Amino acid sequence: MASNKKSSLSPFFPFLKIVTVIGARPQFIKAAVVSRAIQISNKKKKIQEILVHTGQHYDYLMDKVFFEELDLPQPHYHLGVGSGSHGKQTGIMLERIEAVLQKEKPGAVLVYGDTNSTLAGALAAAKLDIPIAHVEAGLRSYNRRMPEEINRLLTDHLSTFLFCPTTQAVQNLLKEGVRNGKGKIVKNVGDVMFDSILYYSKIAEKKPTILKDLDLFNPQSTIRNPQYYLATLHRAENTDDPKRLKSILKALNEIGKKAPIILPLHPRTKKMMKTYDLSPDDHRVKLIKPVSYLNMIALEKNARAILTDSGGVQKEAYWFKVPCLTLRDETEWVETVKSGWNILIGAGTRKILNGLKLIESRKSFRGERELFGHGKAGEIILHVITKHFMKVKRAAMDGQ
Protein backbone atom coordinates (compact mmCIF):
# COMPACT_ATOMS: atom_id res chain seq x y z
CA MET A 1 0.00 0.00 0.00
CA ALA A 2 1.58 3.28 -1.10
CA SER A 3 0.13 5.28 1.77
CA ASN A 4 -2.30 4.66 4.59
CA LYS A 5 -1.83 7.97 6.33
CA LYS A 6 -5.25 8.99 7.58
CA SER A 7 -6.58 12.50 7.88
CA SER A 8 -8.11 13.51 11.18
CA LEU A 9 -11.66 12.28 11.69
CA SER A 10 -14.30 13.93 13.84
CA PRO A 11 -14.28 12.35 17.32
CA PHE A 12 -17.77 10.89 17.33
CA PHE A 13 -18.99 7.33 17.38
CA PRO A 14 -20.70 6.92 14.01
CA PHE A 15 -24.12 5.38 13.58
CA LEU A 16 -22.78 4.12 10.27
CA LYS A 17 -19.32 3.92 8.75
CA ILE A 18 -19.14 3.83 4.95
CA VAL A 19 -16.00 3.13 2.93
CA THR A 20 -16.14 4.82 -0.48
CA VAL A 21 -13.83 3.39 -3.16
CA ILE A 22 -12.88 5.66 -6.07
CA GLY A 23 -9.99 5.78 -8.50
CA ALA A 24 -10.91 7.44 -11.81
CA ARG A 25 -11.89 10.91 -12.98
CA PRO A 26 -15.68 10.29 -13.39
CA GLN A 27 -15.84 8.69 -9.94
CA PHE A 28 -14.42 11.79 -8.27
CA ILE A 29 -17.30 13.80 -9.73
CA LYS A 30 -19.95 11.28 -8.67
CA ALA A 31 -18.50 10.75 -5.21
CA ALA A 32 -18.50 14.52 -4.57
CA VAL A 33 -22.30 14.49 -4.83
CA VAL A 34 -22.85 11.78 -2.21
CA SER A 35 -20.05 13.07 0.04
CA ARG A 36 -21.73 16.47 0.07
CA ALA A 37 -25.04 14.81 1.03
CA ILE A 38 -23.25 12.99 3.87
CA GLN A 39 -21.72 16.23 5.14
CA ILE A 40 -25.11 17.95 5.13
CA SER A 41 -26.81 14.97 6.79
CA ASN A 42 -24.25 14.87 9.59
CA LYS A 43 -26.04 17.79 11.17
CA LYS A 44 -28.69 15.24 12.08
CA LYS A 45 -27.07 11.81 11.75
CA LYS A 46 -23.63 10.51 12.64
CA ILE A 47 -22.19 9.02 9.46
CA GLN A 48 -18.49 8.54 8.91
CA GLU A 49 -17.21 8.26 5.34
CA ILE A 50 -13.77 6.74 4.76
CA LEU A 51 -12.54 7.70 1.30
CA VAL A 52 -10.23 5.20 -0.43
CA HIS A 53 -8.45 6.30 -3.62
CA THR A 54 -6.99 3.35 -5.54
CA GLY A 55 -4.69 5.55 -7.63
CA GLN A 56 -6.08 4.26 -10.95
CA HIS A 57 -5.88 7.85 -12.24
CA TYR A 58 -2.87 9.67 -10.85
CA ASP A 59 -1.95 12.53 -13.22
CA TYR A 60 -2.72 15.96 -11.69
CA LEU A 61 -5.15 16.89 -14.49
CA MET A 62 -6.96 13.55 -14.15
CA ASP A 63 -6.87 13.42 -10.35
CA LYS A 64 -5.90 16.10 -7.83
CA VAL A 65 -7.45 19.03 -9.66
CA PHE A 66 -10.86 17.36 -9.26
CA PHE A 67 -10.49 17.11 -5.49
CA GLU A 68 -9.60 20.80 -5.42
CA GLU A 69 -12.42 22.02 -7.68
CA LEU A 70 -15.16 19.76 -6.30
CA ASP A 71 -14.24 20.37 -2.66
CA LEU A 72 -14.04 16.60 -2.24
CA PRO A 73 -12.48 15.50 1.08
CA GLN A 74 -8.92 14.27 0.74
CA PRO A 75 -8.66 10.45 0.73
CA HIS A 76 -8.03 8.75 4.04
CA TYR A 77 -6.16 6.09 2.08
CA HIS A 78 -4.30 6.40 -1.22
CA LEU A 79 -3.36 2.96 -2.51
CA GLY A 80 -1.01 4.13 -5.29
CA VAL A 81 -1.89 1.29 -7.66
CA GLY A 82 -1.24 3.19 -10.91
CA SER A 83 -1.61 1.74 -14.39
CA GLY A 84 -1.19 -1.85 -15.57
CA SER A 85 -3.05 -4.68 -17.29
CA HIS A 86 -6.66 -5.19 -16.21
CA GLY A 87 -5.90 -8.37 -14.26
CA LYS A 88 -2.79 -7.03 -12.55
CA GLN A 89 -4.37 -3.68 -11.68
CA THR A 90 -7.56 -5.24 -10.32
CA GLY A 91 -5.61 -7.84 -8.34
CA ILE A 92 -3.40 -5.27 -6.60
CA MET A 93 -6.44 -3.12 -5.82
CA LEU A 94 -8.29 -6.12 -4.39
CA GLU A 95 -5.42 -6.95 -2.05
CA ARG A 96 -4.99 -3.37 -0.81
CA ILE A 97 -8.69 -2.58 -0.46
CA GLU A 98 -9.19 -5.79 1.53
CA ALA A 99 -6.55 -4.64 4.04
CA VAL A 100 -8.36 -1.30 4.48
CA LEU A 101 -11.72 -2.98 4.99
CA GLN A 102 -10.31 -5.39 7.55
CA LYS A 103 -8.92 -2.44 9.48
CA GLU A 104 -11.92 -0.09 9.20
CA LYS A 105 -14.73 -2.69 9.50
CA PRO A 106 -17.36 -0.53 7.73
CA GLY A 107 -21.08 -1.17 7.64
CA ALA A 108 -21.12 -0.73 3.86
CA VAL A 109 -18.85 -0.17 0.87
CA LEU A 110 -19.87 2.39 -1.74
CA VAL A 111 -18.63 2.02 -5.34
CA TYR A 112 -19.33 4.02 -8.49
CA GLY A 113 -19.61 3.22 -12.18
CA ASP A 114 -17.71 0.51 -14.02
CA THR A 115 -13.94 0.83 -13.62
CA ASN A 116 -11.44 -1.67 -12.26
CA SER A 117 -11.61 0.27 -8.98
CA THR A 118 -15.37 -0.42 -8.91
CA LEU A 119 -14.97 -4.15 -9.35
CA ALA A 120 -12.04 -4.44 -6.94
CA GLY A 121 -13.98 -2.60 -4.23
CA ALA A 122 -17.02 -4.82 -4.76
CA LEU A 123 -15.00 -8.05 -4.73
CA ALA A 124 -13.10 -7.09 -1.59
CA ALA A 125 -16.34 -6.23 0.22
CA ALA A 126 -18.17 -9.35 -0.97
CA LYS A 127 -15.42 -11.66 0.26
CA LEU A 128 -15.63 -10.01 3.69
CA ASP A 129 -19.46 -10.16 3.69
CA ILE A 130 -19.83 -6.37 3.74
CA PRO A 131 -22.91 -4.93 1.97
CA ILE A 132 -22.08 -3.17 -1.30
CA ALA A 133 -23.84 -0.07 -2.63
CA HIS A 134 -23.39 0.40 -6.38
CA VAL A 135 -24.12 3.85 -7.76
CA GLU A 136 -24.93 3.71 -11.50
CA ALA A 137 -26.23 0.15 -11.34
CA GLY A 138 -28.05 -1.52 -14.21
CA LEU A 139 -26.21 0.04 -17.14
CA ARG A 140 -25.65 -2.30 -20.06
CA SER A 141 -24.02 -1.95 -23.47
CA TYR A 142 -24.44 -5.71 -24.12
CA ASN A 143 -20.90 -5.76 -25.46
CA ARG A 144 -18.84 -8.09 -23.30
CA ARG A 145 -15.65 -7.20 -25.14
CA MET A 146 -15.72 -4.00 -23.11
CA PRO A 147 -13.92 -4.36 -19.75
CA GLU A 148 -16.45 -1.88 -18.34
CA GLU A 149 -19.33 -4.23 -19.18
CA ILE A 150 -17.73 -7.09 -17.23
CA ASN A 151 -17.04 -4.78 -14.29
CA ARG A 152 -20.60 -3.48 -14.08
CA LEU A 153 -22.18 -6.91 -14.52
CA LEU A 154 -20.18 -8.50 -11.72
CA THR A 155 -20.57 -5.51 -9.42
CA ASP A 156 -24.35 -5.47 -9.85
CA HIS A 157 -24.71 -9.14 -9.01
CA LEU A 158 -22.54 -8.73 -5.90
CA SER A 159 -24.32 -5.62 -4.61
CA THR A 160 -26.99 -5.26 -1.93
CA PHE A 161 -27.95 -1.70 -2.90
CA LEU A 162 -28.39 -1.09 -6.63
CA PHE A 163 -28.87 2.62 -7.27
CA CYS A 164 -30.05 2.98 -10.87
CA PRO A 165 -29.87 6.28 -12.78
CA THR A 166 -32.80 5.57 -15.13
CA THR A 167 -35.89 3.44 -15.61
CA GLN A 168 -34.06 1.56 -18.38
CA ALA A 169 -31.32 0.55 -15.93
CA VAL A 170 -33.95 -0.96 -13.61
CA GLN A 171 -35.41 -2.88 -16.55
CA ASN A 172 -31.96 -4.19 -17.48
CA LEU A 173 -31.56 -5.64 -13.99
CA LEU A 174 -35.02 -7.21 -14.09
CA LYS A 175 -34.04 -9.09 -17.26
CA GLU A 176 -31.19 -10.63 -15.27
CA GLY A 177 -33.42 -11.58 -12.34
CA VAL A 178 -32.13 -8.77 -10.11
CA ARG A 179 -35.05 -7.15 -8.28
CA ASN A 180 -36.12 -5.89 -4.89
CA GLY A 181 -36.18 -8.58 -2.22
CA LYS A 182 -33.97 -11.52 -1.30
CA GLY A 183 -31.15 -9.31 -0.10
CA LYS A 184 -31.39 -6.77 -2.93
CA ILE A 185 -32.57 -3.15 -2.77
CA VAL A 186 -33.07 -1.83 -6.31
CA LYS A 187 -34.09 1.80 -6.74
CA ASN A 188 -34.18 4.36 -9.52
CA VAL A 189 -32.63 7.34 -7.74
CA GLY A 190 -31.77 9.43 -10.79
CA ASP A 191 -28.29 10.26 -12.03
CA VAL A 192 -25.73 11.70 -9.59
CA MET A 193 -24.05 13.35 -12.58
CA PHE A 194 -27.20 15.42 -13.11
CA ASP A 195 -26.97 16.53 -9.46
CA SER A 196 -23.39 17.53 -10.17
CA ILE A 197 -24.20 19.47 -13.34
CA LEU A 198 -26.94 21.45 -11.60
CA TYR A 199 -24.58 22.31 -8.74
CA TYR A 200 -21.37 23.07 -10.63
CA SER A 201 -22.59 24.59 -13.90
CA LYS A 202 -23.38 27.87 -12.14
CA ILE A 203 -19.86 27.91 -10.69
CA ALA A 204 -18.44 27.10 -14.12
CA GLU A 205 -20.05 30.23 -15.58
CA LYS A 206 -17.92 32.41 -13.30
CA LYS A 207 -14.59 30.66 -12.70
CA PRO A 208 -13.11 29.06 -15.86
CA THR A 209 -11.20 31.18 -18.35
CA ILE A 210 -10.56 28.37 -20.84
CA LEU A 211 -12.72 29.82 -23.62
CA LYS A 212 -10.83 33.09 -23.45
CA ASP A 213 -7.49 31.30 -23.09
CA LEU A 214 -8.15 29.26 -26.24
CA ASP A 215 -9.61 32.26 -28.08
CA LEU A 216 -12.93 30.46 -28.56
CA PHE A 217 -15.43 32.91 -27.20
CA ASN A 218 -16.07 36.63 -27.22
CA PRO A 219 -16.46 37.56 -23.53
CA GLN A 220 -18.35 40.72 -24.54
CA SER A 221 -21.08 38.71 -26.26
CA THR A 222 -24.16 37.61 -24.30
CA ILE A 223 -25.41 35.42 -27.18
CA ARG A 224 -24.41 31.76 -27.44
CA ASN A 225 -22.51 31.64 -30.72
CA PRO A 226 -20.49 28.43 -30.81
CA GLN A 227 -17.47 28.64 -33.06
CA TYR A 228 -15.83 25.27 -32.33
CA TYR A 229 -16.45 21.55 -31.94
CA LEU A 230 -15.43 19.56 -28.88
CA ALA A 231 -14.12 15.98 -29.11
CA THR A 232 -13.12 13.45 -26.46
CA LEU A 233 -11.55 10.09 -27.18
CA HIS A 234 -10.35 7.57 -24.60
CA ARG A 235 -12.04 4.16 -24.82
CA ALA A 236 -9.78 1.21 -25.60
CA GLU A 237 -12.08 0.03 -28.40
CA ASN A 238 -11.13 3.21 -30.29
CA THR A 239 -7.63 4.06 -29.07
CA ASP A 240 -6.18 0.53 -29.20
CA ASP A 241 -7.49 -0.24 -32.69
CA PRO A 242 -5.30 1.59 -35.24
CA LYS A 243 -7.96 1.33 -37.95
CA ARG A 244 -10.67 2.92 -35.79
CA LEU A 245 -8.31 5.54 -34.38
CA LYS A 246 -7.09 6.53 -37.85
CA SER A 247 -10.65 6.70 -39.16
CA ILE A 248 -11.81 8.96 -36.30
CA LEU A 249 -8.83 11.30 -36.65
CA LYS A 250 -9.45 11.53 -40.39
CA ALA A 251 -13.05 12.57 -39.73
CA LEU A 252 -11.91 15.19 -37.21
CA ASN A 253 -9.54 16.63 -39.82
CA GLU A 254 -12.43 16.98 -42.28
CA ILE A 255 -14.76 18.53 -39.71
CA GLY A 256 -11.98 20.92 -38.72
CA LYS A 257 -12.28 22.57 -42.12
CA LYS A 258 -15.58 24.13 -40.98
CA ALA A 259 -14.57 25.13 -37.46
CA PRO A 260 -11.73 24.25 -35.10
CA ILE A 261 -11.97 21.09 -33.00
CA ILE A 262 -10.80 21.08 -29.39
CA LEU A 263 -9.53 17.67 -28.27
CA PRO A 264 -8.41 17.34 -24.63
CA LEU A 265 -5.95 14.47 -24.99
CA HIS A 266 -6.41 11.53 -22.65
CA PRO A 267 -3.10 9.85 -21.64
CA ARG A 268 -4.14 6.57 -23.29
CA THR A 269 -5.02 8.32 -26.55
CA LYS A 270 -1.76 10.24 -26.53
CA LYS A 271 0.19 7.03 -26.00
CA MET A 272 -1.58 5.11 -28.77
CA MET A 273 -1.34 7.97 -31.27
CA LYS A 274 2.40 7.91 -30.72
CA THR A 275 2.51 4.10 -30.96
CA TYR A 276 0.68 4.07 -34.31
CA ASP A 277 2.32 7.28 -35.55
CA LEU A 278 -1.03 9.01 -35.99
CA SER A 279 -1.82 12.67 -35.45
CA PRO A 280 -4.47 15.12 -36.70
CA ASP A 281 -3.80 18.33 -38.60
CA ASP A 282 -2.62 20.91 -36.04
CA HIS A 283 -4.44 23.71 -37.87
CA ARG A 284 -7.80 21.91 -37.65
CA VAL A 285 -7.64 19.89 -34.43
CA LYS A 286 -6.25 21.64 -31.37
CA LEU A 287 -4.79 19.08 -28.96
CA ILE A 288 -4.82 20.29 -25.36
CA LYS A 289 -4.02 18.67 -22.04
CA PRO A 290 -6.86 17.01 -20.05
CA VAL A 291 -9.02 19.73 -18.52
CA SER A 292 -10.58 20.19 -15.11
CA TYR A 293 -14.27 19.53 -14.51
CA LEU A 294 -15.27 23.20 -14.52
CA ASN A 295 -13.30 23.84 -17.70
CA MET A 296 -14.93 20.80 -19.31
CA ILE A 297 -18.37 22.13 -18.44
CA ALA A 298 -17.49 25.47 -20.05
CA LEU A 299 -16.23 23.74 -23.21
CA GLU A 300 -19.31 21.51 -23.45
CA LYS A 301 -21.90 24.25 -22.90
CA ASN A 302 -20.49 26.46 -25.63
CA ALA A 303 -19.60 23.89 -28.29
CA ARG A 304 -21.21 23.77 -31.71
CA ALA A 305 -21.45 19.97 -31.33
CA ILE A 306 -19.65 17.26 -29.37
CA LEU A 307 -18.01 14.08 -30.68
CA THR A 308 -17.21 11.59 -27.92
CA ASP A 309 -16.86 7.99 -26.78
CA SER A 310 -17.48 8.97 -23.14
CA GLY A 311 -20.70 7.99 -21.40
CA GLY A 312 -20.60 10.98 -19.09
CA VAL A 313 -20.05 13.47 -21.90
CA GLN A 314 -23.03 12.03 -23.82
CA LYS A 315 -25.28 12.87 -20.87
CA GLU A 316 -23.74 16.27 -20.29
CA ALA A 317 -24.29 17.16 -23.95
CA TYR A 318 -27.94 16.15 -23.51
CA TRP A 319 -28.36 18.25 -20.38
CA PHE A 320 -26.73 21.28 -22.03
CA LYS A 321 -28.75 20.69 -25.22
CA VAL A 322 -25.66 20.43 -27.43
CA PRO A 323 -25.86 17.99 -30.41
CA CYS A 324 -23.69 14.92 -29.82
CA LEU A 325 -22.17 12.12 -31.91
CA THR A 326 -21.13 9.01 -29.99
CA LEU A 327 -18.07 7.37 -31.55
CA ARG A 328 -19.08 3.86 -30.51
CA ASP A 329 -21.20 1.00 -31.83
CA GLU A 330 -23.39 0.88 -28.71
CA THR A 331 -24.18 3.01 -25.70
CA GLU A 332 -25.43 2.48 -22.15
CA TRP A 333 -27.25 5.82 -22.34
CA VAL A 334 -29.93 4.93 -24.89
CA GLU A 335 -32.16 7.69 -23.51
CA THR A 336 -29.91 10.35 -25.07
CA VAL A 337 -30.24 8.66 -28.48
CA LYS A 338 -34.03 8.37 -28.21
CA SER A 339 -34.19 12.08 -27.39
CA GLY A 340 -32.57 12.93 -30.73
CA TRP A 341 -29.73 14.90 -29.15
CA ASN A 342 -27.27 12.02 -29.60
CA ILE A 343 -26.53 9.83 -32.61
CA LEU A 344 -24.71 6.51 -32.21
CA ILE A 345 -22.31 6.67 -35.13
CA GLY A 346 -19.34 4.31 -34.69
CA ALA A 347 -15.85 5.08 -35.98
CA GLY A 348 -16.22 5.19 -39.77
CA THR A 349 -15.03 8.47 -41.32
CA ARG A 350 -17.94 8.82 -43.73
CA LYS A 351 -20.50 7.83 -41.09
CA ILE A 352 -19.14 10.47 -38.70
CA LEU A 353 -19.26 13.20 -41.35
CA ASN A 354 -22.78 12.26 -42.43
CA GLY A 355 -23.92 11.95 -38.81
CA LEU A 356 -22.69 15.42 -37.95
CA LYS A 357 -24.43 16.88 -40.99
CA LEU A 358 -27.65 15.14 -39.97
CA ILE A 359 -27.69 16.19 -36.32
CA GLU A 360 -26.77 19.80 -37.13
CA SER A 361 -29.69 19.98 -39.55
CA ARG A 362 -32.28 18.68 -37.07
CA LYS A 363 -34.97 21.21 -36.23
CA SER A 364 -36.47 19.70 -33.08
CA PHE A 365 -35.43 17.50 -30.18
CA ARG A 366 -36.98 16.07 -27.05
CA GLY A 367 -35.71 17.66 -23.87
CA GLU A 368 -36.91 15.64 -20.88
CA ARG A 369 -34.27 16.09 -18.20
CA GLU A 370 -36.51 14.07 -15.87
CA LEU A 371 -35.26 10.92 -17.62
CA PHE A 372 -32.31 11.22 -15.25
CA GLY A 373 -34.18 12.27 -12.12
CA HIS A 374 -34.64 15.67 -10.50
CA GLY A 375 -31.14 16.40 -9.25
CA LYS A 376 -31.66 14.78 -5.83
CA ALA A 377 -29.91 11.44 -6.41
CA GLY A 378 -27.27 11.99 -3.71
CA GLU A 379 -29.88 12.70 -1.05
CA ILE A 380 -32.00 9.70 -2.06
CA ILE A 381 -29.01 7.33 -2.02
CA LEU A 382 -28.08 8.39 1.49
CA HIS A 383 -31.70 8.16 2.68
CA VAL A 384 -32.09 4.59 1.39
CA ILE A 385 -28.83 3.43 2.97
CA THR A 386 -29.45 5.04 6.37
CA LYS A 387 -33.08 3.86 6.46
CA HIS A 388 -31.93 0.29 5.83
CA PHE A 389 -29.29 0.34 8.57
CA MET A 390 -31.65 1.97 11.06
CA LYS A 391 -34.05 -0.90 10.41
CA VAL A 392 -31.22 -3.42 10.89
CA LYS A 393 -30.17 -1.74 14.13
CA ARG A 394 -33.73 -1.70 15.52
CA ALA A 395 -34.13 -5.40 14.65
CA ALA A 396 -30.88 -6.20 16.44
CA MET A 397 -31.96 -4.26 19.54
CA ASP A 398 -35.37 -5.97 19.57
CA GLY A 399 -33.63 -9.33 19.39
CA GLN A 400 -31.50 -8.69 22.47
Image (tube, helix red, strand yellow):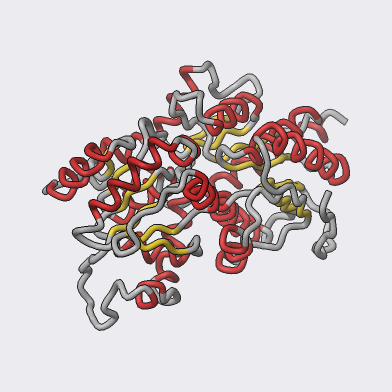
Q: Position of residue 171 (x, y in %)?
A: 43, 25
Q: Position of residue 346 (x, y in %)?
A: 32, 35
Determine whether 388 is above or below 83 in the image. above
Instruction: In the displayed orientation, state which residue is furthest to the front.
Output: 277
Front position in the image: 204 or 390: 204
Left-right relation of 326 to 340:
right
Viewer can see residue 379: no
Determine whether 132 is above or below 66 in the image. above
Left-right relation of 260 to 155:
left
Viewer can see residue 77: yes
Front position in the image: 378 or 272: 272
Residue appearing at x 44%, y 67% in the figure: 295
Residue appearing at x 67%, y 46% in the figure: 83
Front position in the image: 104 or 334: 334
Q: Quadrant of residue 74?
A: bottom right
Count of labels shown? 0
Residue appearing at x 83%, y 45% in the figure: 100
Instruction: In the displayed orientation, state which residue is furthest to the bottom.
Output: 220
Front position in the image: 256 or 79: 256
Residue appearing at x 81%, y 32% in the figure: 396
Q: Position of residue 66 (x, y in %)?
A: 58, 62
- Quadrant where the C terminus lies? top right
Determine whether 348 is above or below 341 in the image. above
Q: Position of residue 361 (x, y in %)?
A: 12, 48
Determine whether 44 is above or below 181 in the image. below
